Amino acid sequence: MSKLITVSQAAGELKAADKILILAHHYPDGDTLGSGFGLCRALRAIGKTARVECSDKIPDKYRFMFENMEQAADFEPEFICAVDVADTLLLGDKLSVYADRVELCIDHHCSNTRYARKLVLNPEYAATAMIVAEIIRELGVEFDRDIAACIYTGIATDTGCFKYSNTSSYAMRMAADMLDCGINSEMINRTMFDMKSKARIELERMALDSMRFFLGDRCAVMVITNEMIEKSGAGEDDLEGLAPIPRQIEGVYVGVTMREKQDGTFRVSVRTDNHADASAICSLLGGGGHVRAAGCTISGPQDRAVEAILEAVRSVIC
C-alpha cells in the first residue's frame, strides 16, 4: 500500500534522486505523455538524468513533446516514477518488469491501486499533468514553451478541449498559464482534436455501422474489430479519440467503445453522463478510471464481451 505524500514531498523525492525513469501507460494519451515529458524536461533542467518510456509506440502526433530533446544515454534506473498510471497492468508488457520497483506514482485516478511506494493522488484534478505542473513549480523550474506545451496537452486532452464536466476553473487557469509561456495552442488543439487521416475516417464509418443500442436506447455500444482496422489501413495513431463517439448521441447515458485486441480480448472504454458512474461499471469487470470515463478489458468472443459489459451497465445505470 502506497504512502500518500504531498506535491512538495514528491518534489523532494525527485530532487534527492538521479537516473530517473518515467513510465507512461500503454496505449498512451496526451495526459500520460504530457505529464511524462513535461516532468522529464523539468528534471533535466535541474541536472537530473531522466528519460520517458512507454510499452507502445508513441503516436506521431505527440512528437512535438520530445522532438527537440536530446536522446538520453542508456542508464540503469535508480528511481522509477509512473505518471497517470492507475494500475501496474496499464504499464503494458514491455514495462511490466518495473511493476514492483515504482518508487513514486503521480496520478489523478480515484481507482489507483496504490502499487507504488509513494503516491501523489488528486482525483479532483482533471489531469495528472496538473499535479505534475505543481511539482515542477516546487522543483523551482521555470516553465519554458516546451514544458508548457506538454502540460497544456495533458490538460486539454483529458478535458476534451475544456468541454468535459471535469473542467474546473483551476484547470482553465493553469492552461492559461501555459498559454502565457508562448505555446502554439492552435497547433496542439488542431492536432489533438481536429486532424484525421483518411484511414481514420474510413474506420469511423465502419465503427458507426457497428453501433447498437440497448436499455431503451440509453446505452450505445460501438465495436472496433481487427478486421475493421486492417480494412481501413488505420494505424495506432488513428485509434485514439474514438471512445467518446457513442456518448455523443442524444439520449445516450452510457457510451461503450470496444476495441478487439490481437489476443481476442476487448479493450473497453466507457463514457457516461450524470445517470451512471463509468468507474463503477468498469470496476465490476476488473477495471476502473473516473466517474465519467473509465475502462476495462473483457475476454471474447464478441457477443459474450458485449453481454458482459451490458450486465455491468444494467447494474449501475439509473
Image (tube, rainbow, N blue to C red):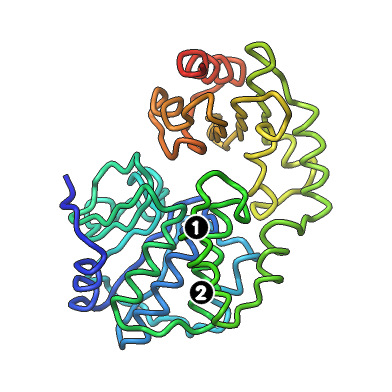
Compared to residue 273, the image places residue 103 above or below, namely: below
Compared to residue 28, the image places residue 249 above or below, namely: above
- How far apart are labels 2 and 1 at the CA level? 12 Å
How far from the left and from the top, in percent, is residue 129? Answer: 44, 62
Q: Quadrant of residue 162?
A: bottom right
Mark 1, secondary structure of its residue? helix
Compared to residue 87, the image places residue 162 above or below, namely: below
- Is residue 225 among the parts visible in the rendering? no
How far from the left and from the top, in percent, is residue 191? Answer: 70, 64
- Front one among 33 and 10: 10
* Label 1 sits on residue: 169
**In which quadrant will I find the N terminus?**
top left
Task: Tell me the tag on residue 115.
Answer: none
User: Is the Cβ of the residue at disc 2 closer than 8 Å to that at disc 1?
Assistant: no
* Label 2 sits on residue: 177
Q: Who's the residue at 64% across and 65% down the image?
A: 60
Q: Answer left or right for 261 relative to 210.
A: left
Q: Who's the residue at 70% across and 51% down the image?
A: 238
Q: Quadrant of residue 6?
A: bottom left
Of circles 2 and 1, which is in front?
Answer: 1
Q: Who's the residue at 51% across and 36% down the image?
A: 292
- Is residue 119 among the parts visible in the rendering? yes
At label 1, the amino acid type is Ser
Q: Quadrant of residue 282?
A: top left
At label 2, the amino acid type is Asp
- Front one among 236 and 123: 123
How far from the left and from the top, in percent, is residue 226? Answer: 67, 36
